[in-house]
Amino acid sequence: IRYLLVNATTRRDANNSIVGVVGVAQDVTEAFKHDRAVAAMANELRQLVDTANAPIFGIDVQGNVNEWNNKTAEITGFPNGEAMGKH
């Protein structure tokens, strides 16, 4: 299977009547495959963090929680949705 990015526009004469179509196609198969591979890897890493046997949490530069895995929720008693974004 190949993936193509296709752009087309009408071609018009002096009276603005449509006389044809001009199109360009670009093969984006490799970029598509790369994007899928990156998404799969990101998903695997997300699952690894979420299901780790150790508490994993993150704090952004403003001091707000931006990561809170299942083990952290279990230990602290605060579910992910309650902890995220808190200072």
Image: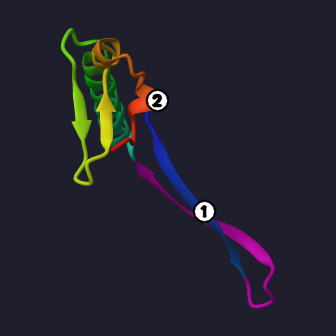
The amino acid on which the numbered mark 1 sits, given as a three-letter code, is Ala
The span from disc 2 to disc 1 (Cα, nearest Å) is 45 Å
Residue most toward the left?
54
- Tell whether 3 sits left or right of 74: right
Identify the disc placed on residue 8. Answer: 1
Disc 2: CA contacts within 10 A as few (<14), some (14-19) or many (>=20): few
Quarter-wise, where is residue 35 in the image?
A: top left
Disc 1: CA contacts within 10 A as few (<14), some (14-19) or many (>=20): few
Residue most toward the bottom?
14
- Tell whether 46 sits left or right of 25: left
Residue 26 within the magenta-colored segment of the rendering: yes
Q: Residue at x 39, y 36 (%)?
A: 84
- Tell whether 59 sits left or right of 66: left
The amino acid on which the numbered mark 2 sits, given as a three-letter code, is Gly
Q: Position of residue 13 (x, y in %)?
A: 73, 84
Q: Position of residue 46 (x, y in %)?
A: 31, 24
Pick whichever, 24 or 41, lies toward us.
41
User: What residue range appears in magenta?
Assistant: 13-27
Pick whichever, 70 or 44, lies toward us.
70
The dominant secondary structure in magenta is strand
**Figure check: 32 above or below 76:** below
Q: Position of residue 53 (x, y in %)?
A: 21, 8
Q: Secondary structure at mark 1?
A: strand
Is residue 1 something one can see in this rendering? no
Question: Which residue corresponds to mark 2?
Answer: 81
Q: Quadrant of the C terminus?
A: top left
Query: Which of the two discs, 2 and 1, labels the residue nearer the N terminus?
Result: 1
Quarter-wise, where is residue 39 in the image?
A: top left
**Figure check: 1 above or below 66:** above
